[in-house]
Amino acid sequence: MNYSVSEIEELNQVCSDLRDGKTATPVTIRNFLWWFDTQRRTPARVQYIDEELARLGIRTVPNYHDIWVDTPITFELIADHKDEAASKESTTNADGSMSKEEDIPERTAADPSFRIGKIPSANIAPVYVSPNANLAEAITLMLARNFSQLPVMTTERDVKGVISWASIGARGLGAKQGSLVQHFMDEHYEIPLSASLFSGIQIILEHNYVLIRASDRKICGIVTSNDIAFQFEEISTPFLLISEVENSLRHIISKKLSISDIKDSCSPEYLPAEFSDVAELTFGNYVKILENPVNWSKIGLSLERNVFCSELMAINAIRNDVMHFDPDPLKVEDLEKLRNVAKLLNRLREIRAY
C-alpha cells in the first residue's frame, strides 16, 4: 500500500510508528505546533495542520485545537479508530433490549466556546488534604503556599469538600466540633475540563474557586478568581494597547490633516468608499496616509517616516492576528512591540508633539 508522506519529519515518524503497530510518543501541543513552525493556533495554521493530519490519516488524542497548550497529546490512525468503534460488542440491557457502548462525541473545531481547560491551573493537579487530617495541617499548607482554599479528598477522584479561610472562620464562631479538616469543610463545586469558561465564572465569583474534573474522572486542577483575573488581563491587554495606538493615530491625522489633504494624497483604493470622516478610516488607511511624504511633512513629527511606518505595519499585522480571536496568547515579542509603540505615541502626546 502506498502511504502519503509529509514534509514534516516528525509527522512521518508518527505515521511510521502507528503503521508498525507502535504507540506514538506523546508530545505537548506547544511542541507539536513547533513542528509546523508556529507558536499559535491561528485559523490559517490550524487549517493547514488539520489538512496535513487528514491527508496522512491520523488524528491527535485529545484534539489539539483548544485545550491548554502544554497538554500532552498522542496520535492514532483514523481508520483504526473507526474499526475499533465498529467492533464494539452490543450488550443486553436489564429490559432485554440491546445497547451499544457509545463514545462521547468529540466537539468539533467549529465550536467557538472558550474552554476552561485552556487555563493553565485547570491542568495542574491540586494539592489536597484528607478529611481526617488535623486542621493545623491544612492551615499550614494554606499559609505556606498562599492558598485561600484546599480540596478535601481521599483519592484523586473522590472529593469530600473544600476547606477555606471562610469555612474555618465561620465554624470558629460556633460550638467547638472537633479539630479535623472534616469538621471545617464546605460542600465543593466542580465543572468538567471541557466546560465553557463562562459556565464556571459564576461559581468562581460566588465561591472564589471551582474544581476541574478530567474525562478520566480525576480532579485535574482548580481555577480561582486570581486565575480568571490573570486570564482576562492576558486576553484584554492586546485589545487595549491596539485601541491606544489607533486612537493616537486618529487624533494625529484628524488634528493635522484635512479630508482634502487625505483625499489628494491617497489613491481611492486606499480609502473607504465615499470617505468623509477620519473616524471611517481603518488601521491600514492610517499607514497609507502617513507613508505619503506630503502628509508626513504637514504632520510635523520629528521622526524618520519610513521607520515609523514600518513599525505601524508590524502593528497592523499583530492587530489582524488579535482580531481573529486565536485561542493562544500573543507571542511575547509581539506584545512588547505593541507596548513600545503605544508608549511612543503617548510620549509624543505628553511633549505636545501633536
Image (cartoon, helix red, strand yellow):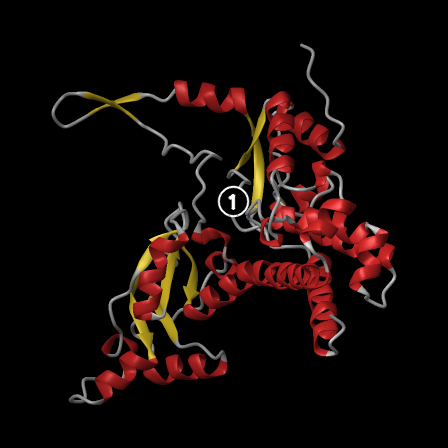
Horizontal and vertical percent position of residue 70: 59, 52
Q: Which residue is pictured at 88% across the width and 61% down the height?
A: 304
Where residue 257 sits in the image (x, y, percent)? 72, 58
Q: Nearer the viewer, residue 99 or 245?
A: 245
Residue at the spot x=63%, y=41% of the render? 272
The residue where tag 1 is placed is 66
Could you say which is closer to the camera, residue 207 or residue 330? 330
Q: Nearer the viewer, residue 185 or 299?
A: 299
> Residue at the location (74% across, 69% down)?
344
Q: In which image quadrant can residue 351 be found? A: bottom right
Q: Position of residue 246 (x, y in %)?
A: 64, 58
Q: Quadrant of residue 53?
A: top right
Residue 243, placed above or below residue 33: below
Residue 140 vs 197, above or below: the answer is below
Name the residue furthest front. Answer: 260
Please rate how many residues cluster around mark 1, counting C-alpha atoms within 10 Å: few if below 14, some from 14 to 19, many from 20.
many
Of helix, strand and loop, which one carries label 1? loop
Give whichever of 295, 239 is nearer the camera.
295
Amino acid type of the residue tagged 1 in the rendering: Asp
- Please tell me whether residue 188 is drawn above or below residue 165 in the rendered image: above
Q: 100 left or right of 16?
A: left
Report the side of 17 relative to 125 (left or right): right
Q: Position of residue 280 (x, y in %)?
A: 59, 49
Is residue 158 something that shows in the picture? no
Q: Residue at x 61, y 45 (%)?
A: 29
Task: Tell me if residue 170 can be seen.
Answer: yes
